[in-house]
Amino acid sequence: MKCRRCKTPAVIKMPRHNTAFCDPCFQEYLLKQVERAISSGKMFSKEAPVLVAVSGGKDSLALWDILIKLGYETAGLHLNLGIGAYSKRSQQMVEQFANARGLALIVESYQKSYGLGVIEIAEESARPACSACGTMKRHHFNRIAMEKGFPVVATGHNLDDEAARLLGNLLKWQVSYLEKQSPVLSDDDGKWAKKVRPLYRLPEREIAAYTILNRIEYVVEECPMSKGAKVFAYKETLNQLEEASPGAKHQFYLGFLKQKEASFPTPPPAKQDETCRTCGQPTQSEQCGYCRLIERATTVS
Amino acid sequence: MQIKLYHPAREISIKGPKPVSSILTHLGLPREAHLVICDDMLVTEDAVISDDAVIEIRPVISGG
């Protein structure tokens, strides 16, 4: 198989574009897709630093690498979730990546902060592990970005993540979630750091290919707590559709974003008008979900 | 050929030569969810893998 552009041997076939690329042409294409996402979504500019949330998995490390190549000013943020060997290995991958490139990295450890890992926090507060983990990550991403002066937090969510989330929201007809699903979440007049997902145009197969071609080492194993998570079933279903009809995931998610503009012309009203009495972050009630979670977990233990 | 697989991590052998597409079909692995690495390079599905080669089939799906 030959590269469609330069006719040298291809390294990846991309049925969704009815094409194949060699290593340099693929990388050029991929960087352009990310630049397009950043500029069309007005995500951020080269004038302000971007905090990149890095887990040690392929997507976030690829994102960090791409943003550096595109000339953005970045720092990494890694949260050590305290999930035994998995978290140790994840932190090691992130530190190895940052050290090799001389990049600024902020690391926070749940074990050091609370004396508990995310599994224990979830158990003590009687919450599903992935739900507690999401609440905690959102809080810390925002807190650290605001404290350290980063107006934007970028995460490695890709096209498959977004399409799977959309499928999950549609299956349950979660209209309020559909309204909010977007690769750019506003800073709500400076109350929050802006959250952006610059990889939303790229399927995870292409991102994995990028990490392999660039010799970026990452944790291939999945988080032990995600076993049986519905997102895998949604992704498998979407991949079956993609094999039968190349481009299906792109049409599904990007089509949704287009339709959403017409269906929800005005942004949903801001509901986070309160300030959490414990941490001071914006919330819908007197105390935010994160503080309730931590209070419950640490009081019980 | 020797094949390194994940979830769970293991190694298996199958008879070569075989094209990558046949290897994936033989193992029941969807193409959209896997990449094949041979000699540290990505290979496309028409590449023929020899009997003495060592390859890695890397899953690309993550929890998100």
Image (cartoon, helix red, strand yellow):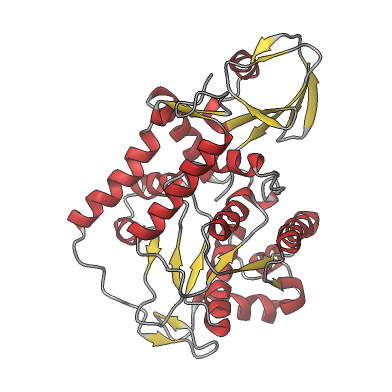
Question: Measuring 60% from the left and 64% from the top, which residue is drawn there?
Answer: A133
Q: Is residue B64 left or right of residue A187?
A: right
Image coords of residue A156 (percent x, y): 53, 55
| Residue A146 or residue B39, whichever sits in front | B39
Q: In this view, does A272 lie to the left or right of B11?
A: left
Image coords of residue B8 (percent x, y): 74, 35
Question: Measuring 25% from the left and 50% from the top, which residue is drawn there?
Answer: A258
Image coords of residue B13 (percent x, y): 79, 17
Q: In this view, does B36 lie to the left or right of A156?
A: right
Image coords of residue A241 (percent x, y): 41, 29
Q: In which quarter of the image is residue B62?
A: top right
Question: Measuring 54% from the left and 74% from the top, which residue is drawn there?
Answer: A139
Asked if residue A242 can be seen in this view, the reply is: yes
Quadrant, the C terminus of chain A: bottom right
Q: How many labels does the image show?
A: 0
Question: Measuring 45% from the left and 74% from the top, which residue is drawn there?
Answer: A47
Asked if residue A14 can be seen in this view, the reply is: no
In the rendered image, the residue lying farthest to the front is A6
Quadrant, the N terminus of chain A: top right
In the rendered image, the residue lying farthest to the bottom is A277
Residue A108 against residue A17 in the figure, above or below: below
| Residue B56 or residue A24, whichever sits in front | A24
Q: Quadrant of residue A99?
A: bottom right
